[in-house]
């Protein structure tokens, strides 16, 4: 087909739709190292905790109320709750919940939150179909590989343009994971990925609203439905991802195909996954980390602090530049608020991003004394912090890599503490501990029964 | 929020999300001329016929089978069938069905198919909620206005880039229509449009596959779910459409805001709607029209024809340049096949785009003798046709506007014949005639009962 000459396009892209489909179907179960499998378990367990934590939040309540208007069949569970809904909406609600606190996992190369669009779709399907924990985990590893490789091919241009890359690549991972769980052949899996390729979800303007967590949820649902449609013979283009008018060239100026094809099946993006110690956008973490470190080392109190100055990459302010947030959700996109709570309380968990804390006078007062300076010589994963005290001292800390990064990963014990911090208030400590244990050993479970029993 | 300087963006866009929401909620019922209301009835009735025609097609069967995996509650009907499904999936299936034959309506300024994403969502909701025909038609007019005005703002750049504009604007119209039927206030309607703004659907690479008709269906469903979520308090950005990282600036280089704001509530895009006399892409119509005219005037038979040469705009070949289609669906994107059947049979209805006809030797032989020459001095709505006969004559016809265009509209009688051509084989002639009559007078119906009784 001829191409409109006004828009440049590459007609010679490799057949990545086919390659990813064949990979998703054909790669052997547990066809990766112990280290990769361990990280996949950490990814899944962290996701379960992040889905349980906000399960009574108004975001999930509103979405669930909308779903209930459809009188859904009780096919699959919602973590942290008693209700069951149909498969597709279980995927939707799981994805929304797990991103509501912005506390989930991050693939730092692309800022994709990998589990959110993939895990809830795979879990809903595995529960409904009676699949094993091993099959579930395989599907999640495969799905994350698909989403993140596509993300690598288009980041950063695609993200710079304004797409929320988690939702705009996640439906592909969800489709691949669900196709594998459904046992589709390569041809139908290619159709599933192709149908999903017409459903990228999410623009960044939604950050700070309930529609941000809708993005992974919507992607999870879109991928699952695409796989179900492909199962029944629904067709899509065989080159839906790579053709000149296929998804990647339509929504990104950068399309580095080698990021999809190189070492496919031999290197694993899930191995690069990281987990947030703080309940806010990842680009704020080094600033919080530095503030917490300076607070602890110098025993700082709010009244000691004259001013706080942080030097950060421009992306930090583009994403989290809200100077005067008035709601908990907005405060997650405020590096100013985050530094203030780090200095005041030594932590930045979900509690520090509630409406109540955002509007505390002491928080507002300290937040007003935080200034941010754009300096693109500082990496976006770093922060350079200078605090002037009322007694005339200048305290300085450069944080190259924040806690929770690939370079400074959270330990299993830290991950468990984070899990229980979210899950205990919902499930109680006993069930919460069981849910953690089951999730961290999911590949040895015969089915989803133990997890669902502990985590709902 | 600061903007990444690598991507240009307009931070001063007018508040179109708010304006469209206030318009959708506040414009009075039937707040337009008789001529507009008549065209809205024609739009609806044509859509009903287009939804009934393919209701037993494999495309709808496959989609329905996938939906049935969710054990949907029987909330709303599927035109042409006995089954009922939940609201959201009734919207999906209605949108898929009505675009399966590529025979539905066209807003020629943007090549949007306006009814497909809006009418099935509004109909499903009106049936479920017991709304009147007047309320249904009002919602459809409003929804089409929203989609097409956004389309006007971004066409042609957005389409040139590779988006299937019907699905990538349709979810906004569906959300507006559904918000109005649900009785949401302006603030919640703004949220409904905002949630929908994260769900543009469809890339053009899918043309020729079942995923093309998925686009209006997916958009219908996305808009309906967005409205239901907004009803229950789900939030989105108040500037989800117009902000620098909102939908329009993310997915289009052209954003002519005045196309949304000028004369809003005073001019009506539905009045510009057109209906296809031929069951294929609109850009092929002038070529078919010319071939049919030459066939009739000169009594041409296949064996008389030595060669056919058409001069057309480059867009025609970009969209419909398949030289050797092998399936019915592919043949809809072949200007070559379309000219051949126009010359052989004097028509190009759904039957001429079946696998059987595509693979007939006489069709293949004539198709091979059709050549297309790109000439961008020919408007994309025109075609210049030259036929050389075996006895040495040169026959010529320039078609400026095809039958079915705004300039040469189909009469009500022609529309009725098209309706019955699709509907009679499904419903039988008696019910089909009743369905047409009810649809053409829907605004006087107390509810959806008469239509559903006749059309399922």
Image: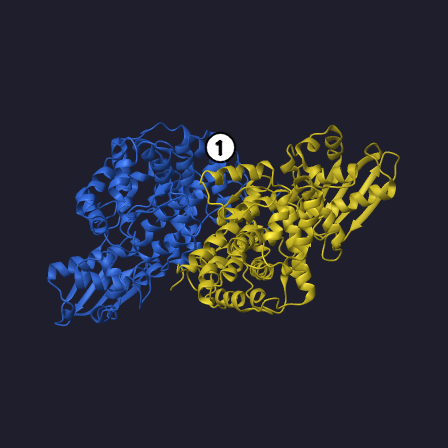
Chain colours: A yellow, B blue
Residue B420 relative to residue A406: left or right: left
| Residue B436: quadrant of the picture | top left
| Residue A1: quadrant of the picture | bottom left
Rendered view: B223 above or below B28: below
- Where does the image place residue A341, in percent across and percent down from the top left? 75, 38
Q: Callout 1: 10 Å neighbours few (<14), some, many (20+)?
A: many
Rendered view: A3 above or below A401: below
Q: Quadrant of the C terminus of chain B?
A: top left
The residue indicated by pointer 1 is: B188
- Which element type, helix, strand or loop, lies under badge 1? helix
- Where does the image place residue A109, in percent across and percent down from the top left? 64, 57
- Where does the image place residue B357, in percent across and percent down from the top left? 23, 65
Rendered view: A5 above or below B418: below
Q: Quadrant of the N terminus of chain B?
A: top right
| Residue A296: quadrant of the picture | top right
B204 or B394, nearer to the observer: B204
Instruction: State the residue at coordinates (57%, 41%).
Output: A82
- The chain letter under disc 1 is B
Residue B38 relative to residue A225: left or right: left
- Where does the image place residue A205, in percent across and percent down from the top left? 56, 42
Instruction: State the residue at coordinates (56%, 58%).
Output: A147
Q: Is residue B193 visible?
A: no
B17 or A282, nearer to the observer: A282
Q: Is residue B291 visible?
A: yes
Rendered view: A386 above or below A2: above
């Amino acid at each position: 087909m001829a191409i409109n000459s006004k828009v440049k396009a590459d007609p010679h892209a490799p057949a990545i739709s086919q390659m990813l489909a064949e990979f998703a179907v054909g790669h052997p179960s547990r066809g990766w190292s112990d280290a990769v499998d361990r990280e996949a378990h950490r990814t899944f367990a962290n996701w379960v905790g992040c889905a349980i934590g906000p399960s009574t939040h108004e975001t999930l309540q509103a979405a669930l109320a909308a779903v209930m208007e459809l009188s859904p069949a009780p096919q699959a569970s919602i973590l942290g709750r008693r209700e069951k809904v149909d498969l597709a909406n279980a995927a939707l609600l799981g994805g929304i919940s797990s991103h509501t606190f912005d506390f989930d996992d991050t693939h730092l190369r692309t800022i994709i939150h990998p589990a959110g669009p993939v895990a809830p779709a795979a879990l809903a399907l595995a529960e409904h179909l009676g699949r094993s924990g091993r099959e579930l985990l395989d599907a999640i590893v495969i799905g994350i590989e698909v989403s993140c490789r596509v993300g690598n091919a288009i980041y950063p241009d695609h993200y710079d343009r304004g797409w929320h890359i988690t939702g705009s690549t996640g439906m592909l991972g969800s489709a691949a994971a669900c196709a594998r769980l459904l046992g589709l052949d390569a041809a139908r899996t290619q159709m599933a990925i192709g149908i999903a390729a017409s459903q990228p979800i999410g623009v960044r303007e939604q950050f700070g609203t309930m529609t941000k967590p809708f993005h992974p949820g919507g992607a999870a649902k879109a991928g699952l439905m695409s796989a179900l449609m492909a199962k029944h013979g629904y067709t899509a283009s065989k080159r839906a991802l790579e053709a000149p008018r296929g998804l990647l060239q339509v929504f990104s100026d950068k399309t580095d195909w080698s990021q999809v094809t190189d070492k496919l099946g031999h290197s694993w993006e899930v191995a690069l996954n990281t987990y947030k110690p703080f309940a806010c956008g990842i680009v704020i973490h080094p600033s919080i980390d530095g503030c917490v470190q300076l607070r602890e080392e110098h025993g700082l109190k709010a009244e000691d602090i004259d001013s706080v100055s942080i030097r950060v990459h421009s992306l930090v302010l583009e994403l989290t530049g809200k100077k005067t947030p008035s709601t908990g959700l907005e405060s997650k996109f405020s590096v100013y608020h985050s530094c203030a709570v780090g200095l005041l309380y030594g932590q930045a968990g979900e509690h520090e991003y509630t409406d109540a804390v955002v509007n505390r006078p002491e928080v507002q007062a300290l937040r007003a004394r935080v200034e941010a300076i754009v300096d693109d010589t500082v990496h976006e994963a770093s922060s350079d912090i200078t605090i002037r005290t009322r007694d005339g001292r200048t305290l300085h800390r450069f944080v190259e890599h924040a806690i929770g990064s690939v370079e400074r990963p959270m330990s299993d014990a830290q991950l468990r503490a984070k899990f229980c911090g979210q899950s205990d208030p919902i499930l109680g400590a006993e069930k919460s501990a069981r849910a953690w244990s089951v999730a961290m050993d999911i590949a040895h479970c015969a089915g989803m029964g133990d997890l669902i029993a502990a985590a709902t």
